Amino acid sequence: MHDSSEEETLASELFMELASELRCSILMSISRRPVKLSSLARELDGSVQDVHRNVNRLTDIGLVKREDGEIHLTEYGRIVTKQIPYFVFMKKHREFFKEHSIAGLMPDKFLQRIGALQNCKVVNTVTAVLQKLKELESSAAKSLKLMVSQAWPEEGEIMIDKADSGVEISVIVGHNTIFPKNVAENVAPRVEKLASKGIIKGKMVEQVNMDIYIADNARAAVMFPNTKGEVDMNSMFVGEDLIFCEWCLDYFDYMWQRSSTPVNPRKLKIVEY
């Protein structure tokens, strides 16, 4: 018989307490504000006795405490509750992750914060994705940050227009980033000219494994790779949630700081369609 390690035992004990829908609801409710037992029962549409019993269980394991007649999260409880969005996000999008791979894609510090995507909207189909990206990029008034695995004509035109309007633009491309021939011939030279003047800043990395788009640090979108390692432009997470935007910005900055290599047009992957 397998002897559980201390870590496995501690995890199983915590997950057993969180396996109750009512106890999870209690934690999420009082994470917003401390509340009296009677008010909590009304909010959760449960009996005072049932809620009282489950509050006692959460108190016994140190997740909640009583102060001045109200139920509060302990510091331990606050930290545990902050991790719940991670599991909610993964459960909600379990079908998505049957066809996509991110676990080996990013450092653990970003994977552990994947719950930041919980409040995003999912956009499906290439047409809808490109339309949403056009709206996002066109909305930029101060800054536009892009990490792309595939360039498209309108995106280049938007970048040039925004740069001419004084928007600060930073772009990350990889040796694997695809540039259609018409983009390379008609748009890239104009972008390169703006880059030579420092109006558009660009860096090149070995490989772009996922696409990130950030407008004014307030609106963002991300696309993940499929199980073949190719960025899937049929599906995108997009939103204006502050925590999500911070996640995207932190990942973009992480990739930006990893490279000191300027974009080399001769190393772009140009294809004909």
Image (tube, rainbow, N blue to C red):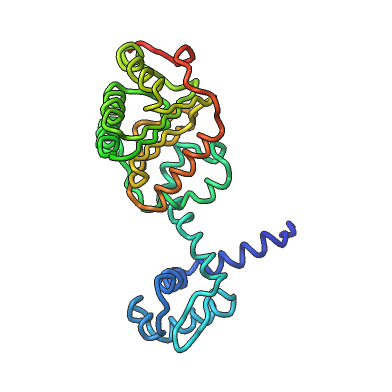
Quadrant housing the N terminus: bottom right
Q: Quadrant of residue 63?
A: bottom right
Q: Is residue 237 left or right of residue 162?
A: right
Q: Quadrant of residue 178?
A: top left
Q: Position of residue 236 (x, y in %)?
A: 35, 38
Q: Please name the residue shown 72% across and 59% down the image.
A: 5
Q: Position of residue 149 (x, y in %)?
A: 42, 26
Most distant residue in the front direction: 197
Vertical order, 214 against 182 (above or below): below
Vertical order, 77 against 194 (above or below): below
Q: Position of residue 190 (x, y in %)?
A: 32, 17
Vertical order, 12 against 59 (above or below): above
Number of labels in the image equals 0
Vertical order, 86 against 49 (above or below): above
Q: Nearer the viewer, residue 84 or 195?
A: 195
Q: Position of residue 227 (x, y in %)?
A: 48, 32
Quadrant housing the C terminus: top left
Q: Nearer the viewer, residue 125 or 156?
A: 156
Q: Please name the residue shown 58% across and 76% down the image.
A: 62
Q: Nearer the viewer, residue 247 or 140?
A: 140
Q: Is residue 156 left or right of residue 14?
A: left
Q: Please name the residue shown 50% across and 24% down the image.
A: 204
